[in-house]
Image (cartoon, helix red, strand yellow):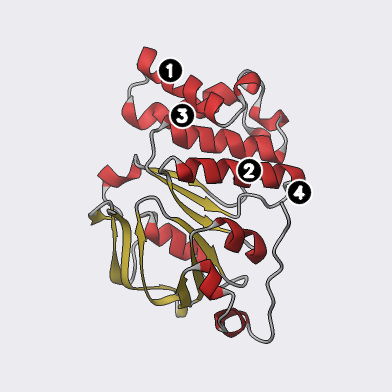
Amino acid sequence: MTGVLEATEVSFTYGDRPVVEDVSLTVEAGEFLGLVGPNGSGKTTLLELLIGLRRPDAGSVRLFGEPAHARSTGRRVGYVPQNVSDAADGMPVTVREAVRMGRYPRRPFGRFDDEDRGAVDAALRRVGIDDLAERRVGRLSGGQRQRAFIARALAAEADLLALDEPTVGVDAESREAFYDLLGELNEDGMTIVLIEHDIGVVTTHASEIACLNRELYFHGDPAVFVETDALAAAYGGSQSIVHHQH
């Protein structure tokens, strides 16, 4: 196993407000890490630190063996941020054009060749939306939009997929199909880091769980997590996990 992400004693503060405090964790190649915690716990900030969108105030993050903010690491990460589906309402592009954006880092001057077109077509087929290639992104359902953004990451030939609450506003049937897709990608070797508010879902699908509320309360096997008091400690009070039937 080769380490993809390594955070060491990472802290980050907004003004005088600590958001992430002394967090250390490692994500190995091929893992599916579910990142959970209450609202305002620092999950999005930690994810942004892990993939190099922010620099820590203390500690260090290495991504693919390099400093996370290094330019060379960016093309290897497919990032689907929070609320990106809502932002797609105003995108005046087709699905194919949106997915092709994933090739831009490899073709900075926009000279696309057969290899690029083949990568886009393959990504569309992989996520099951090749029949929607010429439809405007703003006319897709929530689940279809998320597949389009994942296809963009696949077209970029990303090695790490980072998603921030991707199924908010997505219906139950589409959510189940979406997690089936993530499972298939993970089985094919894609490393995934996912923020998810539904703890029952993420403990069912992820291979590792990290539970955060500014500091890290747990990092390890989901089966162990559900038997510990980390959930109650991080969220406060008595908490329970509901596992969904699929």
In the depicted view, which residue is nearer to us: 10 or 154? 154
The residue most toward the top is 114
SS class, disc 3: helix
Pointer 1 or 3: first along the chain: 3
Identify the residue position indicated by label 4 in the image. 172
Q: Nearer the viewer, mark 1 or mark 3?
A: 1
SS class, disc 2: helix
Q: CA distance from mark 2 to mark 1?
A: 23 Å
Q: Amino acid at mark 3?
A: Met
Residue 171 visible in image: no
Residues packed near mark 4 inside 10 Å, few (<14), some (14 to 19) or many (20 plus): few
Q: Amino acid at mark 4?
A: Ala
Q: Amino acid at mark 2?
A: Phe
Q: Residue placed at 63% from the left, 65% from the top? A: 199
Q: Residue placed at 53% from the left, 41% from the top? A: 184
Q: With respect to residue 129, does 162 lie above or below?
A: below
Pointer 1 or 4: first along the chain: 1
Residues packed near mark 2 inside 10 Å, few (<14), some (14 to 19) or many (20 plus): many
Identify the residue position indicated by label 1 in the image. 118
Number of labels in the image equals 4
SS class, disc 1: helix
Identify the residue position indicated by label 3 in the image. 101
Q: CA distance from mark 1 to mark 4?
A: 32 Å
Q: CA distance from mark 1 to mark 3?
A: 14 Å
Residues packed near mark 3 inside 10 Å, few (<14), some (14 to 19) or many (20 plus): some
